Image: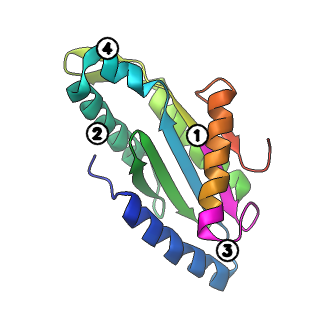
Amino acid sequence: TGLPHHGALMKALADAVEAAKASGEPLGLVMIDLDDFKGVNDTHGHPVGDALLAAFARRIREVTRRGEEPFRYGGEEFAVLAPGAGPAAIAAVGERVRAAIAEAPFELEGLRLEVRCSVGVAALPADAREAGALVEAADAALYRAKRGGKNRVERAGEG
């Protein structure tokens, strides 16, 4: 995908949490999961799935703004770290990513794939005080988005 991986996210997150605590600024985290990704692999094969993951990562990079850092969390999960983003701002980042994925099909390997994603967002200090708890809060919101019908953004603390 060309994005930094899980280990790089956890290091950046730990550093960002310390910086946020020192400055008193909020810190937002977006967790993103491709909806029904297994079906892409099962229907079109793993090479198409791999191409989709790379294209998905490119699209996330295209819509992230200065200071927002995208990462591959693992499998078909991605994350965006957004220093300075509180609850409302991080929800807007999540919606910007969700809309960018849903608004245009992916043209890959001669296929036109309509792709959607579910998104969970959380902010420090509103939803968590430590890095691990921030990931847990965003991840719980992500799974609420999945259970709530997919292709949506859920905020931590609103479920």
Three-letter code for the amino acid on which mark 4 is drawn: Thr
**Residue 130 appears left or right of 109:** right
State which region is magenta.
120-133
Three-letter code for the amino acid on which mark 2 is drawn: Ala
Give the quadrant of the C terminus.
top right
Looking at the rendered image, the disc whose residue lies closer to the viewer, 3 or 2, is: 2
| Residue placed under numbered mark 3 in the picture | 25
Three-letter code for the amino acid on which mark 1 is drawn: Val
Neighbour tally class for label 4: few under 14, some 14-19, many 20 plus, Cα within 10 Å: few
| Mark 2 or mark 1, earlier in chain | 2
| Residue placed under numbered mark 4 in the picture | 43
CA distance for labels 3 and 4:
45 Å
CA distance for labels 1 and 3:
23 Å
| Mark 1 or mark 4, earlier in chain | 4
Q: Which residue is at 35% across, 21% downward? A: 40
| Mark 1 or mark 3, earlier in chain | 3
**Residue 157 appears left or right of 30:** right
CA distance for labels 2 and 4:
18 Å
Residue 54: which numbered mark, if any? Answer: 2
| Residue placed under numbered mark 1 in the picture | 119
